Amino acid sequence: PLIIYSGDEQIYVKGNRNSVGGQLDDQRVEKEFTDQEFQLKKGDIIYMFSDGYPDQFGGPLGRKFKMVRLRNLLRDIHDKPMEEQYNYIKSNFFLWKEDMEQVDDVLFMGIKL
């Protein structure tokens, strides 16, 4: 997924349901990906992340973090300095996960133009 912040506007772009690498069988199937173009300006923030963050189980009920919660988290911190956002996103993940096993790899990238 991709989330762009332009000012206080959150733009959510759902990615294609194709993995970038790896194959489950010997068939060579051509995967289709959708090209997306955006007009960005100085100060805009681009967040890209794998499904490992929203799919992580945790919290008081042992449930998934989910995309809605992640979008709300970014809404709450997008206007903070990038280093502060990094620290918050990282610590929030471990607070959510607590002692539950990590279910997937987690990639999270934020770029401020």
Image (tube, rainbow, N blue to C red):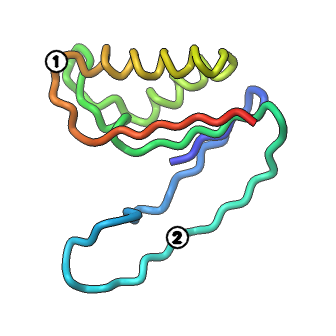
Asked if residue 39 is positioned above or below residue 68 in the image, the reply reads below
Q: Does the image show residue 10?
A: no
Query: Toward which corner of the image does residue 55 lie, by quadrant?
Result: top left
Q: Secondary structure at mark 1?
A: loop
Query: Toward which corner of the image does residue 65 lie, by quadrant?
Result: top left
Residue count near mark 2 (Cα–Cα under 10 Å), binned few <14, some 14–19, many ≥20:
few
Give yes or no for contact between labels 2 and 1 (Cβ–Cβ under 8 Å): no
- Name the spot of residue 48 as percent of width and height, x first: 53, 43
Closest to the observer: 101 or 83? Answer: 83
Q: Does the image show residue 5?
A: yes
Q: Which residue is tagged 2?
A: 33
Relative placement, left or right, of 83 versus 63 is right
Residue at 50% of width from left, 48% of height from top?
1
Q: CA distance from mark 2 to mark 1?
A: 36 Å
Residue at 52% of width from left, 31% of height from top?
71
Residue 89 got which mark? none
Query: Toward which corner of the image does residue 58 lie, by quadrant?
Result: top left
Q: What amino acid type should be assigned to the residue bearing mark 1? A: Asp
Asked if residue 81 is positioned above or below residue 101 in the image, the reply reads above
- Name the spot of residue 43 as percent of width and height, x first: 79, 31
Q: Secondary structure at mark 2?
A: loop
Q: Which residue is tagged 1?
A: 99
